[in-house]
Amino acid sequence: MPGVTRILLLLASVILSTFVHGQSDEYQEASKLFRAGQHAQALERVDNILKSTPKDARARFLKGLILTEQSKPADAIKIFTSLTEDFPELPEPYNNLAVLYASQGQYDRARGALEMAIRTHPSYATAHENLGDIYAKMASQAYDKALQLDKGNAAAETKLGLIKELFSSNTRGNKPPASKTDTSTRATVSPVVASKPAPPPPAAPVQAAAVTQPAAQPAAATKPAETAKPPAADPSSEVIKTVNSWAKAWSDNDIKGYLGFYAPNFQTPKGEPRSDWEAARRLRIGKKKIEVRVETPKVKITDSNRVSVTFRQDYRSPGFKVASTKTLMMVKNGDRWMIQQERVGS
């Protein structure tokens, strides 16, 4: 599928290009080795950095790129996923996840990752473009399936032809992709790459495409521990108390109390209107006996007004029970902690 290979070779050069100043000799050397295609040696250097500073965002990001170039997508996905968990405010790791998912034909997951990138940074033009390409690829598959089922469907044939024509000409350059896999997605590559621009991406039906780092974000990615200002007091106990109260309101079928825990800017799971999401929750919560338990909550502090709390959620209702890992992204609204986003899964 040539249309989904473009996200993976651009991202690092942009996200990391602003970190050239002040970076360690070890990191500079790792970046140079990566640029030179000496991936095993670059990985060894990066691992040395992570032994002493395991949370270093730029080193972890570079490791994800190296693993991608080594055709280890599963390992690269783990790296970028962990970056989205530790630094949910950065859109680039979501974008690279989308590239990896798209290269495997997992367009639904690619779409979800790109939507998260856009939510964290609404003006992130690359993510918007990549998302358009993913939608186009999914549409192409749907029209193709329609033609398989109904060979005389002229409308579907016309629409499929339009999509193929749209991506038939290479508007970004004719150089083939650097990756060995047939992925038309490019991510950015590493700090040192700033001095040597990445090659233009190839033409492809779905260009989950090039990535550009917003000017405001890089500093956070370089030295997360230094840029994130710790809160004056540890809010963990207050946050956990809020989560337990949220679960109790849910268990008590207290719909008004339950919905009151969600922030005004709550990001609904599927991007649906807040009113639609609330209506669906009212229907589900108000009609049956529910028991929700929160186990082993762990709080991560982003800054004085933002935290994430991950826990095991035990949900039970008549005829149904499920245990899952859930993460709540929470923000301080006045003197209350409120839920801004929910994620299910580890």
Image (cartoon, helix red, strand yellow):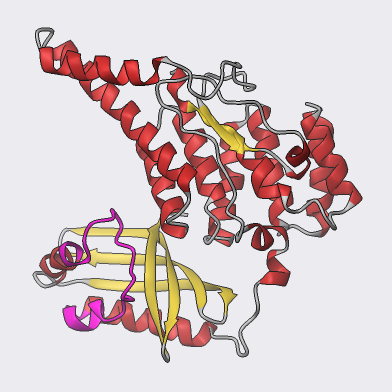
Q: Is residue 40 left or right of residue 200?
A: right
Q: What x and y, as percent, mark residue 217?
A: 60, 59
Q: What x and y, as percent, mark residue 41?
A: 84, 33
Residue 243: say if magenta. Answer: no
Residue 83 visible in the displayed image: yes
Establish if 253 lies above or below 207. Answer: below
**Image quadrant in which the N terminus is located:** top left
Which residue shows up at 62% across the image and 22% down it?
A: 179
Which residue shows up at 9% across the image and 8% down it?
A: 152
Q: Is the stretch drawn in magenta largely helix, strand or loop?
A: loop
Q: Name the foreground residue: 213 vs 255.
A: 213
Tell me where residue 286 sits by quadrant: bottom left
Establish if 127 lies above or below 84. Answer: above
Tell me where residue 36 sits by quadrant: top right
Magenta span:
252-277
Q: Name the foreground residue: 170 vs 187.
A: 170
Q: What x and y, as percent, mark residue 72?
A: 62, 30
Q: Is residue 65 left or right of residue 329?
A: right
Q: Is residue 83 left or right of residue 53?
A: left
Name, please, the residue furthest toward the top: 151
Q: What x and y, as percent, mark residue 334?
A: 41, 89
Name, please, the residue furthest toward the right: 25
Which residue shows up at 62% across the image and 18% down it?
A: 180
Residue 258: say if magenta. Answer: yes
